[in-house]
């Protein structure tokens, strides 16, 4: 039998309709989320508490490769990253974007809240200005020191 949480994973073409049907207000975040760690799950838990639903948009593998995190990144492909994300209790819906930034997708979904981790300066993100243009909020969630996928991969590789 297929686990029910897999229903949270939706192709981008269906994302706007599915997001509109979620409990409002909707919180949106995006990222690669390649090899989950404690910083990610605390971040997602806090993000979900800022609204009634949490939407996570993952970079596709092609998009993630263009971010230059390393020649073999992402280690987990886009389907695997989506399944792990969908299994997390705070996450309501998972989709992907193939561009370099989630700007166009955010314009399609029109979330009430955009969040990123404290490693981002929200005042410099075009996505933040976009969400604020319809009266939404753009918020940074405090960074959990000592946790990053890149550091974890380096540790594993010794
Ligand atoms: N330690 C952390 N504390 C809080 N938020 C985090 C932390 N690490 C990542 N995030 C947030 O999670 C989202 C996804 O981040 P990302 O996938 O780049 O994680 P990462 O561990 O920094 O990965 P990498 O080392 O591969 O860049 C981003 O919004 C980022 O701000
Ligand atoms: O996992 P990351 O590196 O935090 O995700 C990136 O975030 C960027 C951010 O939203 C600033 O614009 C985004 O542009 C990029 O495509 C990754 O999702």
Image: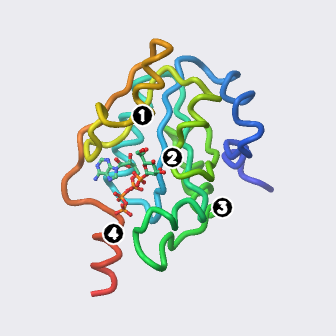
Which residue is pictured at 33% across the width and 69% down the height? 150
Label 2 beta carbon within 8 A of ligand 2: yes
Which residue is pictured at 62% across the width and 56% down the height? 83
Mark 3, mark 2: which one is toward the viewer?
A: 2
Label 1 beta carbon within 8 A of ligand 2: yes
First reached walking from the N terminus: tag 4 or tag 1: 1
Measured in 3D between alpha carbons, the distance from the residue under mark 3 to the one under mark 4, in whole angstroms, is 20 Å
Secondary element type, mark 2: loop
Instruction: Using the image, determine if residue 88 lies above or below residue 109.
Output: below
Label 4 beta carbon within 8 A of ligand 1: yes
Mark 4, mark 1: which one is toward the viewer?
A: 1
Count residues near mark 4 (Cα–Cα under 10 Å), then give few for <14, some for 14-19, many for 20+.
few
* Position of residue 56 measured from the top left corner of the image (x, y, whole percent): 54, 42
Whether label 1 touches label 2, CB < 8 Å: yes
Measured in 3D between alpha carbons, the distance from the residue under mark 3 to the one under mark 1, in whole angstroms, is 27 Å
Provide the residue designation for mark 1. Answer: 126
* Position of residue 132 measured from the top left corner of the image (x, y, whole percent): 42, 19
Provide the residue designation for mark 4. Answer: 150
First reached walking from the N terminus: tag 3 or tag 4: 3
Whether label 4 touches label 2, CB < 8 Å: no
Provide the residue designation for mark 2. Answer: 101
Side of 74 where 155 appears, left or right: left
* Position of residue 133 measured from the top left corner of the image (x, y, whole percent): 47, 17
């Amino acid at each position: 039998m297929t686990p029910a949480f897999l229903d949270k994973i939706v192709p981008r073409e269906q994302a706007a309709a599915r997001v509109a049907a979620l409990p409002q207000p909707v919180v949106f975040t995006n990222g690669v989320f390649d090899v989950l760690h404690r910083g990610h799950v605390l971040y997602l838990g806090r993000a979900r508490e800022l609204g009634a639903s949490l939407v996570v948009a993952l970079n596709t593998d092609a998009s993630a490769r263009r971010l230059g995190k390393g020649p073999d990144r992402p280690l987990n492909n886009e389907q695997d990253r989506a399944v792990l994300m969908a299994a997390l209790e705070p996450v309501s819906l998972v989709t992907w974007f193939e561009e370099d930034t989630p700007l166009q997708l955010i314009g399609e979904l029109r979330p009430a809240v955009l969040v990123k981790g404290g490693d981002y300066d929200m005042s410099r993100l075009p996505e933040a200005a976009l969400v604020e243009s319809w009266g939404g909020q753009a918020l940074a969630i405090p960074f959990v020191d000592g946790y990053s996928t890149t550091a974890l991969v380096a540790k594993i590789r010794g």
